[in-house]
Amino acid sequence: MMRMMLYEAAQSGLMRSAKWSWLKAWAMKIARHRGMKKAIVALARRLAVIMHRQGGRRSVRTGQDQIG
């Protein structure tokens, strides 16, 4: 289920979004060399890594979860 959501988010970010970002530029570079389908999968994986790194962080000083 999560994999499907990430794929859809990556696909809509590449295909439908007119606004450019560093993620879209990175994925379009992959699309030029490897193809659009592989670029979408690579972008979905990159989004998963970003979400994983942001989730569940603890503050070193306070020991409490950081929000935002």
Image (tube, helix red, strand yellow):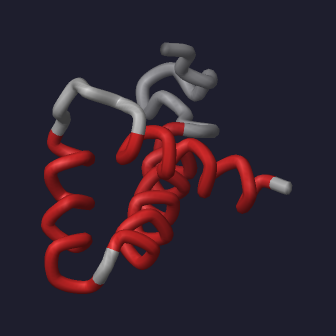
Task: Give 5 or 57, whichever is nearer the viewer.
Answer: 5
| Location of residue 68 with respect to 12 vertically, above or below | above
Which residue is farthest bottom?
A: 34
Image spot of residue 51 (x, y percent)? 53, 44
Q: Residue at x 56, y 43 (%)?
A: 9
Q: Quarter holding the N terminus?
A: bottom right
Q: Residue at x 51, y 20 (%)?
A: 62
Q: How many marks?
A: 0
Image spot of residue 37 (x, y percent)? 45, 73
Which residue is farthest right?
A: 1
42 with respect to 34 (left or right): right
36 with respect to 23 (left or right): right
Task: Give 50 or 37, whichever is nearer the viewer.
Answer: 37
Q: Residue at x 39, y 44 (%)?
A: 15
40 with respect to 14 (left or right): right
| Location of residue 41 with respect to 15 vertically, above or below | below
Image spot of residue 29 (x, y percent)? 14, 66
Task: Give 58 or 67, whichever is nearer the viewer.
Answer: 67
Image spot of residue 36 (x, y percent)? 36, 70
Which quarter of the picture shows residue 56? Answer: top right
Q: Residue at x 72, y 61 (%)?
A: 3
Which residue is farthest top?
A: 68
48 with respect to 20 (left or right): right
